[in-house]
Each structure stands twice: as C-alpha cells, then as structure tokens.
Image (cartoon, grey):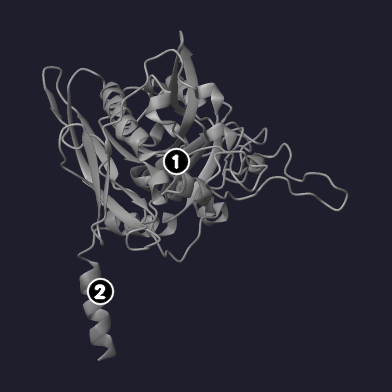
Amino acid sequence: MFNDSIDQYSRASTLVPCTLARDLTSDFALLNQEIRFVQSDVELWVSYTQLENAYEEANYENLLWLLTCRTFLSEGLEQFYQHASLINSCLPRYPVGIHEGLTLDGKKSIFELGRVRAASLNIRMGKTWEEHGDQYYNSIVPRGREQFDLVDEDFGELGKVITELDRCDFKELELHIYLFRKSDYKGDWEASGNRWIMNLGNDEDDEGYDVNEGSSDADSYAEDYWDLYGTNLDNPEQLAGYIADFDFLKNLGNSWDTVRVKYTPTYMKRYWGDRDPVSANVLAVPIIEQDLARTAKELVGGEGWALEDRIEDQNETASGWVLNVERKGSEERVECLKHIGLHDYLAPCDGCNRRTERFHLEPAGDGVVKFVGEECGKVIKFKTPVLNTENDNGINDQ
C-alpha cells in the first residue's frame, strides 16, 4: 500500500515540468517579502506578491537563499521581477543600502529597479490656499512630507532614477489617492469649535520639555486619525474655486501600458462639526477626478488610450472611484467616464442615532442636492453649492 502511494506520487510528479516546479518553489520562498535598496541615492521599497494572513513575515534574511548559488540567484530574481511591485520611494536614511547582506560585491544590491514591471503607490494629498489676484482657492497638493520629511512626495527623486535607467520594464501602474488634513495639534479642541481632536502634541517629559517638538509625530499625522477626519476643505462660499493639479505624476514617466487609479474621499468615514462640508466635496471631488483622468492619459503616452471608470463599494469609507486607463494605438481614443462626482458619504445620523450612516446621492430638483440615509431614510438637502467670486471671501477671517 505504501509503495503504491509512492508510485502514484512519482507518476504525478512527472507531469509537472521542472521549470514550473522551480517557479512554484521560488514563489513560495518569495511570498510576502519586501526589500529596500538604494539606487541613484534614492531608497526604493519593492514588494513581492502580498497575501493576507500569510505565515511568513517580510524579513531580508528570508531572501539570503538567493546568494547560495548562481542558479538560485538567476532563477529567483527572474521569479521575483515577474510579481514584484515598487511600493515606495524616499530619500535614504542611511548612506548605504538598508540590507548590505543582499549584495555580491558588498556595495551594490542584487536588485535593480529597471527590471521591476509594476508599481503600486500611495499618494497622500491635502489642502493649501492659493491666491490669484484677489481670489482665494483651495488647492489639492501632496502632503506626505509633513508626515515624514524624507518622503519623495511628488516622485521628483524617483523620476530622476527612472530617467537614468538603461533598462526600464515598467508596464503596470496602480495609484491610491488619499486626502487628509492638518490641524492645530497643540490643542484638544479644534479651532473650528465643534470637534475634538487627538492630542499627539504638547506631551512633556519630567523636565517640562515637549517630547514631540520637531518630530514628524508632532503634526498628528497618524494614519487612523487622518482617515477619520479628512481634508479640511473650505466652504464654497469662502472660495473662488478648487484646484487639482496632478502633473507631478508625470515624474513617473509615460511608458506605462496600464494605469489604475483609486481615489477615496477618506474624510467621509466620519463627519463631525461644521468643517469638511459635504457641499465643498460636491464641487471638489469632480475636479479631482477629472484631473486624475487627464494626467493618467499622459502616463500611458498621451496619444492613444481607453478610459473607463466605476464605483467600488467599501465598508468603512465613502465609495471609491476607480479609473482604468489602457494604452492604445495613436488613432484610438475611447473615454467612458460615467461616475464622476461624489456619490455617498458616511456620517453620524441624528435621525436614527446611528454612529455611522451612509448617505447616498439621489436625484433632486434643479438647484438642490439631496442625500438619503441608507438605513433610516433620513433626507439631507441643501442648495447646489455656489462659489464666491467676489473679492472679499472671508478666508483670512477664520
């Protein structure tokens, strides 16, 4: 009986090509691993396929098997680049690579950015004010550096690395766009009056010194905090308009075959007080999405392209807007954008006393915007937002 089982296994194993068996072995050994290395004075984070609840955590020591022989190195790297993705770039914290052990000469990493085929990048955006003449605008700008001062927030440094590559295999780009806000972190009660904030600043040691002063944490840039409380856009009646300019994404080059953009107005997780007004997002969200679509065309070459968008339901945030862009021949241009705009948001509901209720946009009469609660049916109505084009908009009076 035992010998029969061995024979059956032997016969089955002969059906699996040796190359496939090696690929499967390498895939298992590389799963969930992440490597950081420095190329052209920029620290790059590259991750292999990520699976939730995987047993093995990322650790550079898990990749030392690549150095055991040239065959393992060649075949392992080939498998790595098949499924690896660039996930971050920043200015290096150290003068040499993070993992000096993954090198053949003690200096240069065995990994090369030019052989990576995909990138999946998170982009943190926030609001600033711009003045044009006598008019004030909310401008949506990269804000990652305020969380960590070495972040390559506009991909300027990464762009330099890409342009210097002798070989560039990049084909698939995925962008996750988040908006978040900065507040007066020194106080417990926000200046606008109606909302408590997390007090991550003003912590004193035994001698009375502020332990957070000068640190990145002093700005209260905690992930869960910004997911909850959002971008702090100003009311439309205070502004002449909202500006979104994603031209900085062109630093990533225009060699991509496909681009996938996912944008989530994350402040919609919660809605407290009179800040982050829904009316502001009714106007700002379409502007942000349209500029993302414009820029995405440039990333696939700007000549021929196919665009389509869709809405992606999410449990704990407003619905995500997903844009898929594909490179096409120079004469082919297809644009199918049917979901531009704010579709829903999450907020406490005083109608059913639910801590979090989802309010969906529904048709209303001319000049009216209407959202309806998903569970209780509470109706939120307001006039279609109108921007202030007068000289005196009160921005400086806040």
Q: Residue at x 16, y 32 (%)?
A: 366
In the rendered image, which quarter is residue 264 located in? top left
From the viewer's side, name the closer residue of 55 and 325.
325
Q: Position of residue 270 (x, y in %)?
A: 42, 51
Is residue 360 something one can see in this rendering?
yes
In the picture of the structure, the residue carrying the numbered disc 1 is: 87
- Horizontal side of 13 relative to 356 (left or right) equals left
Q: Residue at x 34, y 30 (%)?
A: 284
Vertical placement of 326 versus 200: above or below?
Answer: above
From the viewer's side, name the closer residue of 247 and 281.
281
In this rendering, the label closer to the viewer, 1 or 2? 1
Q: Earlier in the sequence, mark 1 or mark 2?
A: 2
In the rendered image, which quarter is residue 332 located in? top left
In the picture of the structure, the residue carrying the numbered disc 2 is: 10
Q: Position of residue 45 (x, y in %)?
A: 50, 41
Q: Residue furthest right?
A: 207
Question: How far, Cα to Cα, is label 1 from label 2?
Answer: 41 Å
Kind of residue at disc 2? Ser
Vertical placement of 46 versus 287: above or below?
Answer: below
Is disc 1 surrounded by few (<14), some (14 to 19) or many (20+) residues within 10 Å? some
Vertical placement of 351 versus 257: above or below?
Answer: below
Q: Position of residue 38 (x, y in %)?
A: 56, 34
